[in-house]
Amino acid sequence: MTELTKNNYSRIALVGNPNCGKTALFNQITGSRQKVANYAGVTVERKEGRFTNPQGRAITIIDLPGAYSLNATSPDEEVTRDMCMGKYRNEAPPDALICVIDATNLRLHLRFALEICRLKRPTIIAMNMSDIAKRHGIEIDIAKLESILGVTIVPTVATQKNGAKTLLDTVDHSFTIPTIELTDKTDLHVEVRNLLLECVKYTSQTSTAFNEKVDRWVLHPIIGPIFLIILLFIMFQAVFSWAQPFMDGIQDLTTWLGQQIAHLLPDGILQSLIVDGIFAGVGTTVAFLPQILILFLWILCLEESGYLPRAAFLLDRIMASVGLNGRSFIPLLSSFACAIPGIMATRTIPSAKDRLVTILIAPLMTCSARLPVYALLIAAFIPHKTIGYVFNLQGLVLFVLYFLGIATAFLVALFLKKGKSSYENSLLLELPSYRFPNIRSILFGLWQRIEIFVSRVGNIILTVSILLWALSSFPKAPAGATGPAIDYSFAGTIGHWIQPFFAPVGFNWEICVALILGLAAREVAITSLATVYAVGAVDTDAPTQLIHFLSSQWSIATGLAFLAWYVFAPQCFSTLAVIKKETGSWKIVIGTTAYLFVLAYFSSFVTWHVASLLFK
């Protein structure tokens, strides 16, 4: 092994297979000193961060997209390949590479490490999850492996505090150019097999036996899907059952703050802006944050436990029936958080047509921005009662709404693909070992969701709340007016002008205003309703009692029709902008908006007329 004398690496790239813990390692090394952007010329996400080495020198670290091979089959892998080989556009190549491998899955990860070694660039191998490998009875002769490869190998535990300390301590002096001789004709699978025979011993099969026993049930063609449905069902039950005390606390706090400010300020425009505009709009939306966090808590736990790849495997057969495969599962699952990262995650799909179809159906997944709207309307129109001594009726309705979005997405995919799927794009997965979810990683993920939500509240929702308050407050009602003052405002005029078009689906003018402003962000619909009814309400308690207000002012048919609309509602402007960037086509953007609008209008029309007959 030849140690390099160069000691001024300023740009280091992290590379590795997906699910190797690379991003967790990146988060631990850089902490909050990171930023997210796109690579020049493409929309593949890049993360860059900074850290200070023990010698006090600032170093930039780049988290490259996960790749299974440098023989790229997707836009993500193309960026990783070109960056590692120093061929990415006009951008300077990184000074050195840190290749992250999973110590519990060396058969897969060593192959990619050999490809990195073949580049003959300054390299360190970070052997992540080394603690789990030891518990599983995997003994790795690191010294011998270092000698064969000609690179420094550093054990890391990305999920533990200070788990990357040894790596940081060696960054300045341990990069080496690999000495192992590999050519383009070298059979890397054979090389990996030889490395495992020489450097790895398995003293226990406990972990493998445990995984096989669990997978025998979890991946069963009949029991597995049933278990997945039950798991998702419980998840949506928990969204309502667990969140209610926290929601009540937030609502009480915002109500109290609004009342205190109302007492401090004299009657007038300023008091109306703060109480009716900001607290009625923003405060009502913030109250639904606990439900979003509980939903993400479940998703993060499933991801951390190693279950998500198995869910993708289970759904591969179902995906194939509509012309897709399990590769679409992760982008679609990401869309439950937000359609934007879900659409961006389609870059890992090799087939251009499969990628386009996944982009088109991603908006049908129920993003977290719809959850507050669902929660508001379900609480207003669905009784809070238990069915069969076990199931919460409101949670059951929420599950049905999510299921409707998924079922419709599959039908749209079936129509677009006409049931055809390519064998060469079949899903191949290396399933990770089951593990207990890491509390630190889960808390970090939840904190990121809080930051995103607060950012939306502070930017989009607050801005729209103030705008809507102004539209609802001006111009003032003329002298001698007999109707509510808001009817004479700009918002009232716009709503009444649009309302005839939406009359066939049972929407009033207040809903029409909410639909327009909801294009900025889905949850803004709640802000809009809270602000409109706060300004126009006779009862001053209406802003903090929006649920009760809607249940008394709207018919059940109107409430259910509005729920149906939001299952298929056209996307927010941000999502449409991402679709344009990913596809480069305005036709696709317009087509996506059009088909979602048609679905939303049709479903609301049918729901309103059927409900009107059933609930006379």
Image (cartoon, rainbow, N blue to C red):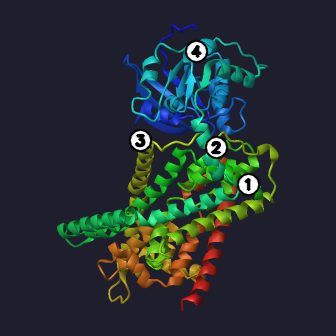
Up the image or down, 209 lies above or below 599; here it is above
Question: What residue is rendered at 52% in x and 52% in y?
Answer: 299
| Percent coordinates x, y for residue 607 in the rendering | 60, 80
Specify which label sits upstream in the sequence, 2 or 3.
2
Q: Which one is nearer the viewer's eye here, 343 or 294?
A: 294
Specify which label sits upstream in the sequence, 2 or 1.
2
Residue assigned mark 2: 212
Q: Is residue 589 left or right of residue 142?
A: right
State if disc 3 and disc 1 touch (CB < 8 Å). Answer: no
Question: What residue is rendered at 64% in x and 43% in y?
Answer: 212
**Label 1 – label 3 distance at C-alpha:** 34 Å
Specify few, some or many for label 4: CA neighbours under 10 Å numbering under 14, 14-19, or 20 or more.
many
Amino acid of disc 3: Arg
Q: Which one is nearer the viewer's eye here, 85 or 115?
A: 115
Q: Quadrant of residue 613?
A: bottom right
Quarter of the figure that contains the C terminus: bottom right
**Label 4 – label 1 distance at C-alpha:** 42 Å
**Label 4 – label 2 distance at C-alpha:** 32 Å
Residue assigned mark 4: 146
Residue assigned mark 3: 440
Secondary structure found at label 4: helix
| Percent coordinates x, y for residue 237 in the rendering | 49, 66
Residue assigned mark 1: 317
Specify few, some or many for label 3: CA neighbours under 10 Å numbering under 14, 14-19, or 20 or more.
few
Q: Is residue 297 left or right of residue 535?
A: right
- Mark in the foreground, 4 or 2: 2
